[in-house]
Image (cartoon, rainbow, N blue to C red):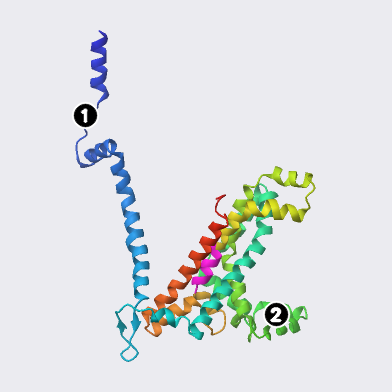
Amino acid sequence: MTAIFITTNEATSILPGRGGLFGRLSDAFWRHPKLLLVLMLTPPLLWLGIIYIGSLLALLLQSFFSIDDFSGLVNYEFTLSTYAQLLNPTNFDIIIRTFIMAALVTIASALIAFPIAYYTARYAQGKWKALFYLGIMLPLWSSYLVKIYAWKLILAKEGILTWIFEKLHLSWLLDGILNLPVIGGNSLSVSYLGTFIVFVYIWLPYMILPTQAALERVPGNLIEASSDLGATPRQTFRTVLLPLALPGIVAGSIFTFSLTLGDYIIPQIIGSSRLFIGQAVYTQQGTAGNVPLAAAFSVVPIVIMALYLWLAKKQGAFDAL
């Protein structure tokens, strides 16, 4: 009786195969789960490999060609002369200008974001924390171009910012800032300072959110223990809070630094006539038709970010991620 029961149980435990195309496919995926995994991963991997990595490789390949000075056509012979053109004073000035702006935007964003993120992580609760997230995310819901043109109106000579300075009888201060030789201009909307302000505003949420997430993971008892052991607030910040929050700051800096390096719309709308890397790529590829030089300019942010990530990893900034 026991043998019959086992045989019957084994017979009923294996269901017959389902008919139809979808039924047979379902049975095949059930018997071979790795096949389903391969089919699910193939489209995104093909997209990443062909569209993204393939485009980067094609871009890198273009940078090793050159433009014929007489015909203006691309000379498909391997050469480093295009990269040598990046060291020309005009092109090298574009690279340095973009790098300095990206570094300053990243530092300013970190300085502004840290106290906001710290207050939210340590003190905001309930609806106040929800209000914080809403306030940070709300600017991201509006159009990128709308925000830039709104800032152009705000920073213009006839804008609300100039009006506020006049009402506060501080026009002399604004005029003094605009008369500065490097960052000034006819108005804030056509100055490096205006470009800097808009960059910080646009990319600030990308610094606040990772920093706040890192500070959320800092145990409060560590800060209390540091105070109990006699550390001053400055020592607690330097030896406890900052090292633990560093992965979030680094993550935010990757966004702000890389996005500033490659952006060409903000400098095009707000700022002086001096080019940034993104504008140089657009100009060389579109107006001048010098695709190899545009490709060489495009490689510069990739190299800078690769060096930055390598240095950050070497300093252990990613260990706590």
Residue 318 screen position, x and y as percent? 55, 53
Specify the segment rendered in magenta. 254-263
Q: Is residue 192 left or right of residue 291?
A: right
Q: Residue at x 54, y 84 (%)?
A: 274
Q: How many marks?
A: 2
Disc 2/disc 1 C-alpha distance (Å) = 80 Å
Q: Which residue is mark 1?
A: 16
Q: Residues within 10 Å of mark 2 (few under 14, many from 20)?
A: some
Residue 296 seen: yes
Q: Amino acid at mark 1?
A: Pro
Relative image position of residue 130 (x, y in whole percent):
62, 51
Residue closer to the observer: 42 or 234:
234
The local secondary structure at tag 2 comes to helix
Picture quadrant of residue 49: bottom left
Magenta stretch containing residue 284, yes or no?
no
Whether 113 is drawn above or below 283: the answer is: above
| Amino acid type at image mark 2 | Trp
Q: Would residue 141 be visible to someone looking at this image?
A: no
Which element type, helix, strand or loop, lies under badge 1? loop
Residue 169: mark: none
Question: Residue 217, how many percent across, how many down?
Answer: 62, 47
Determine the residue positioned at 25% across, 20% down.
Answer: 10
Q: Which residue is mark 2?
A: 163
In the image, which is nearer the foreground, mark 2 or mark 1? 1
